[in-house]
Amino acid sequence: MNALEIRGLTKQYKNRMAVDALDLSIKQGELIALLGQNGAGKTTTIKMLSCLLTPTSGDALMLGYSIKTDATKIKPQINVSPQETAVAPTLSVRENLELIARIYGSAKEAAKEKAQASMEVFGLTEHAKDRAKALSGGMQRRLSIAMALISEPKILFLDEPTLGLDVRARRELWKKIGELKGKITIILTTHYMEEAEALSDCIAILHEGRLKALGSAEELKQQTRTGSFEDAFLTLTGADI
């Protein structure tokens, strides 16, 4: 069974078509990158798939459940690490993790165990007592993703996870994301071409609300007969290179 089956997914705002009859299948354990210029429909698609926005038409089956009729069954199995780092700034690293674990139903002791395990996985143990606002940008992003994972989702949405990070912090986070591949299904949005190429199993390029191309970075380079993935992206979205 595929993790996601998107069929004719559409969202229209008055005279603007944000997402236009999107069809896409995503395998379990796959990391797929959604790429596109600003306004391509990436964020709208993520909001519909995470049951935060109702489609105008079409549907998507997530783990066999419809986003239109089974949102209450879907939400416990997914989580989102948003573009804006979603941490409570005055709480410590440990407190942030324990809070989310408790919100998702863990008992007090179980929440402590999950928080400890998450800190070890994401290299946050030394910062357990630090307030989130005192962390570097890279560490805050690690914490945000750890918080999204503490509920043990089967599908994880990562919206611009390395936005604004320096090169070293970005590469460190790439490593952590790469270690999740094959374990859960990940839908990643990013504006960094090298990030999509380095991390994804498959890349979906959206343009003006439509699916423009789908394949691995290498397949898209071959399709466009370009030497780099960035050139392939620009060619597929109609930009001059």
Image (spheres, rainbow, N blue to C red):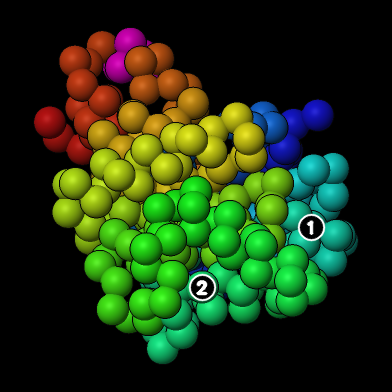
| Residue 227 seen in the current view | yes
The residue lying furthest to the left in this view is 241
Q: What range is drawn magenta here? A: 220-224
Pick whichever of labels 1 and 2 is earlier in the sequence.
Answer: 1
Say which residue label 2 marks. Answer: 94
The answer to if 223 sits in the magenta stretch is yes
- In front: 50, or 36? 50
Amino acid at the residue labelled 2: Arg
Secondary element type, mark 1: helix
**Picture disc at residue 74:** 1
Image point (65%, 61%), residue name: 114
Image point (46%, 65%), residue name: 144
Amino acid at the residue labelled 1: Ile
Residue 238: give x, y in percent of width and height: 26, 35
Is the residue 187 above or below the residue 88 in the image?
above
In-image side of 55 versus 81 (left or right): right
Image point (58%, 55%), residue name: 117
The residue lying furthest to the bottom in this view is 90
Prevailing secondary structure class for the magenta stretch in the rendered image: helix
In-image side of 175 versus 99 (left or right): left
Residue 188: give x, y in percent of width and height: 47, 46
Secondary element type, mark 2: helix
